[in-house]
Amino acid sequence: MAAAAPPPPPTPAPEGFNDVPRGSTPMGYPLFSRIRLAHPTDVPHIHKLIQQMAVFERLTDLFVATESSLSSTLFTSPPFQSFTILVLEVSETPFVEHLQCNNSAYPPTIKTHNLDLPIDDAERDLFRSNGGDAVVAGFVLFFPNYSTFLGKPGFYIEDLFVRECYRRKGLGKMLLSAVAKQAVKMGYGRVEWVVLDWNVNAIKFYEEMGAKILQEWRICRLTGDALNAYVNA
Amino acid sequence: MAAAAPPPPPTPAPEGFNDVPRGSTPMGYPLFSRIRLAHPTDVPHIHKLIQQMAVFERLTDLFVATESSLSSTLFTSPPFQSFTILVLEVSETPFVEHLQCNNSAYPPTIKTHNLDLPIDDAERDLFRSNGGDAVVAGFVLFFPNYSTFLGKPGFYIEDLFVRECYRRKGLGKMLLSAVAKQAVKMGYGRVEWVVLDWNVNAIKFYEEMGAKILQEWRICRLTGDALNAYVNA
């Protein structure tokens, strides 16, 4: 996984112009992003992100996960072999220290974005990552699936989410690209996920990323009492 | 997994009635079915079943799997932890010997069906299982998926297929039930799969099995050149 080099330090402001807002320099407002493997201490943030996603998808009635249920069912196998989470962090200062997230299975991906305007993150404190400048801005959860037609595995993305104030900055594309790159690296044949048919922005985004939307297939779901009835069937 | 007891031996025909066809007795034509974990030696049969499924789904252009690609990507982890295949066998004589398919992870499920008419299986020799009376009639391939809303795993069924001449006898229901039972046994929250929107018989069958058809979701797929482009993205 290639990591973008850290940007050069901002050009010092000319004498007498120390009060010029950073946004008026050619640098704009740098935002540094990092994608890394999640670890169990990320669960509280991941839980909040899933909750926000349920609100966005108008599906809060289906949301019953707790931090405890996530903790006991995730992180049970090596990355990419089963349920895998990549966390997206952003910071206004460069990421200089990867000790905590260095993992031979997945070196962190780093990128610099030059924004025209600073981001007003009202939930900064809620999503602060490890007490530093970085905040958690999104995540992707995926796991292997299998295509019998191709005769090889792929990845299925269960969730891809970027918090509202960080959208339309290429961060969602970074998360999806990270999964696609990993799939290619492992010789996998497909990356698949689902989208709500009314979410036209997402559909446009996914098509621009090279995905085909399969119009003919419908998901069938057996859950709750209907599923539990099978125990004595 | 409860196994149905073998049926009593057929009632001897009354003297002088030895030539009466079996179908005229109250027993009808017994068919014995068994669901067991697949093993690598089943791959040639599984490959042929996938090919028949591709023909049925009018998707032969997507079918490129070979016995070799299946062998090298399946059977790589313990059952239920990743890609898992259950094979459905049928026989006109009872299954008396389970040595080959006994597995503490999944004892075989056995059932007896009383048919009104015998089944004319033109492909009997192609699908003969282990040189005995049994033939392979179908399979189901599934693997764990994850619901972040439930905070727990489920199973995703990639394929469920019963050969044409064995359909409408409850065998597909047996395969789906086997996966649903296993999901409940493992404390999983959902069993999901997809269906083509024109396959009204399948949709009716799945609804009768307790499944909900999710009309709003569409599958997105990144594959082939569009996926490979990400390696240098």
Image (tube, coloured by chain):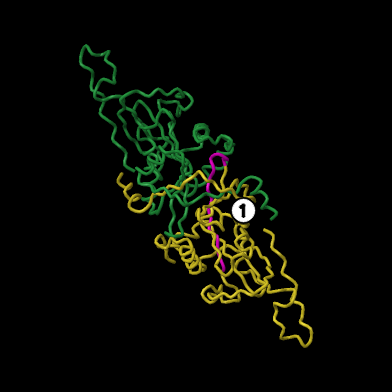
Chain colours: A yellow, B green
Is residue A145 magenta-colored?
yes
- B197 to A19, vertically: above or below: above
* Residue pointed to by mark 1: A180
- B64 to A6, vertically: above or below: above
Residue B4 point in image, percent of width and height:
30, 37
Region rendered in magenta: A137-151
Residue drawn at point x = 37 percent, y = 44 percent: B207
Q: Under tag 1, what secondary structure?
A: helix
Residue drawn at point x = 53 percent, y = 53 percent: A143
For this rendering, which residue is in front, A206 or B171? Answer: A206
Task: Bin the neighbour count of mark 1 within 10 Å (Cα to Cα): few under 14, some 14-19, many 20 and up.
Answer: many
* Badge 1: chain ID: A
Is residue A10 magenta-colored?
no
Quadrant, the C terminus of chain A: top left
Residue A156 point in image, percent of width and height:
53, 51
Figure quadrant of residue A67: bottom left
Main secondary structure found in the magenta portion: strand
- The amino acid sitting under disc 1 is Ala
Q: Residue furthest left?
A: B14
For this rendering, which residue is in front, A149 or A58? Answer: A58
Quadrant, the N terminus of chain A: bottom right
Q: Residue furthest top?
A: B16
Q: Residue furthest bottom?
A: A16
- B219 to A93, vertically: above or below: above
For this rendering, which residue is in front, A24 or B184? Answer: A24
Residue B138 point in image, percent of width and height:
44, 34
**Residue A70 left/right relative to A165:** left
**Residue B213 left/right relative to A86:** left
Residue B198 point in image, percent of width and height:
46, 39
